[in-house]
Image (cartoon, rainbow, N blue to C red):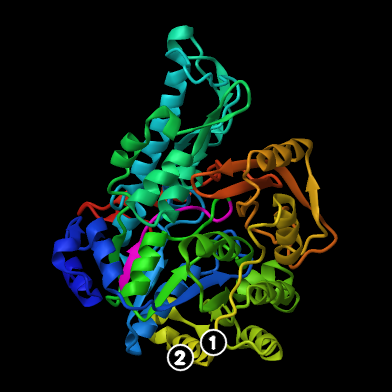
Amino acid sequence: MRPIYEIAKRLGVPARWVEPYGLYKAKISLEGCARLRSRARRRGRLVNVTAITPTSAGEGKTCTAIGLTQALGRLGSRVVLCLREPSLGPLLGVKGGATGAGRAQVVPAEEINLHFTGDLHAITTAHNFLAAVVDNHIVQGNRLGLDPVRETLRRAIDIPDRSLRHIVTGIGGKANGIPRESGFDITAASEIMAVVALARHLDDLQARLGRMIVAYTTAGKPVTAKALNIVGALSVILKDAIKPNLVQTLEGQPTFVHAGPFANVSHGNSSVIATDLGLRLSDIVITESGFGTDLGTEKFCDIVCPQAGFAPDAIVLVVSVRALKMHGGAEGGLANLRWHLQIVQRFGLTSVVAINRFPGDTPAELRVIQRCCRQLQVPCAISEVVARGGSGGTALARLLLATLRRRRAKKFSPLYRSGDSLEDKLQTIAREIYGADGVKWDRLAEEDLRRLTQQGFGHLPVNVAKTHLSLSDEPSLKGAPTGWKLRVRELRVSAGAGFVVALCGKTTFMPGLPKHPLAEQLRLSRAGKVVGLE
């Protein structure tokens, strides 16, 4: 690894704006972010890395994004990679770390995967402090007339713990608060996580925090964090978490790893601050969206880009033989690939398919994917970045550069208009992105729809919370399922983040640990080195 000051210098960031956390990672000061934005005359090209519907272990989007960045660097491009911060949940549970693998990694991997610069802890603290202030307000006289029964703000923790999904608090008498049902969400699902990821600068962060709805009065009127005079304290807790984190790939390419919203319960993309800074400092920014095009990329195009003023220039769609087999075999699974390519086209964007090669893939299986891409007239390349690093991604990098050169005037547009009703937005997402026959509303969701529309939130985009293991809301439905309707259980407004959350299927905001969590593999060597992350 190279000293982080060297990485910053290559990127064009003066040392006075670099706040080091050890030798190999640093934050960029907010002053530096503002000055660098004002200096830049233009933005670079924005490339989004996504995937078909993944297996539970993922399909290598992060590895592909890292390897592609390294390959572009080898070809002489000024390139920056933007990734989300890992949660401890997947690291200790099922999926593992989120810094790549093999020769396609961002480093220092152990530190990034564990506690990094403390951003997720700061977000957890801010979230729980806000929840404590709400409860304290009720106990201390309830000046605003908050409804003690109707809960809006649950607690947050960065550990999967199913026993915390539904709890009762305030037991033991008045001194311990008011008894009520509550629960915990994983930190990645916190609205404060989404707010940090979407904020463009400190003033925007404070404005978004102030708009967060934290309770309702007994008359049903929403109460914001601003009404509790708590925004200043929240900003203090988050003062460092909002600064983007700078690290590097194994081949020394600059990488921003910042904010960590999950794509199945939140908007699932890296921070606006980091992405915008990367666009000002490079010719190409590679960013990754969570899960498939139906989740992270849809939200990138319909939520993140309109709020941030971004317009993606191309999509790299990752596919693997392993994922196709899960969807019906190397041949049968192609329906899922075709559908995801259609999703990209619905946003007016151009796709490049990255075939993430695994050691057990046969030449015949790889040819099936290549033949399908030729028939659809979509360029594709085999990626071997995990085994070979940047050299294993040069074919993909050249293909992407050629695609960017050929691209004419931008045709990108979100899927729906802000003026569409919430109901129409959900219908459009269900039909155009998931392939459903429409939406099936639970009674509670219908009530939420009327209430949120009356309260003036109908103009907000919709963030659908659903399973990532299927295009549908049922994990067992593979391929490109038809003849079903998207079940909407509940609607919640995240006014600070600027979207309405639609809870669909059986999605939970608090995952649980598997029978044998990956944490069983972790240990420290006698030299103090973390073993088992790989």
Q: Is residue 226 left or right of residue 381?
A: left
Q: Is residue 6 magenta?
A: no
Count of picture labels = 2
Q: Please determine whether, in this image, residue 497 is positioned above or below residue 176.
A: below
- Find residue 527 and report its horizontal and vertical position in percent: 20, 54
Label 1 belongs to which residue? Answer: 381
Q: Residues within 10 Å of mark 1 (few under 14, many from 20)?
A: many
- Find residue 99 and report its horizontal and vertical position in percent: 39, 63
Q: Earlier in the sequence, mark 1 or mark 2?
A: 1
Q: Residues within 10 Å of mark 2 (few under 14, many from 20)?
A: some
| Closest to the observer, 220 or 276 | 220
Helix, strand or loop under label 1: strand
- Find residue 51 and report its horizontal and vertical position in percent: 58, 70
Q: Which residue is located at x 44 percent, y 20 percent?
A: 137
Magenta region, residue range: 254-264
- Which residue, as the protein is rendered here, is positioned at the far right? 483
Label 2 belongs to which residue? Answer: 398
Q: Amino acid type of disc 2?
A: Arg
* Quadrant position of the N terminus in the picture: bottom left
Name the quadrant containing residue 414: bottom right
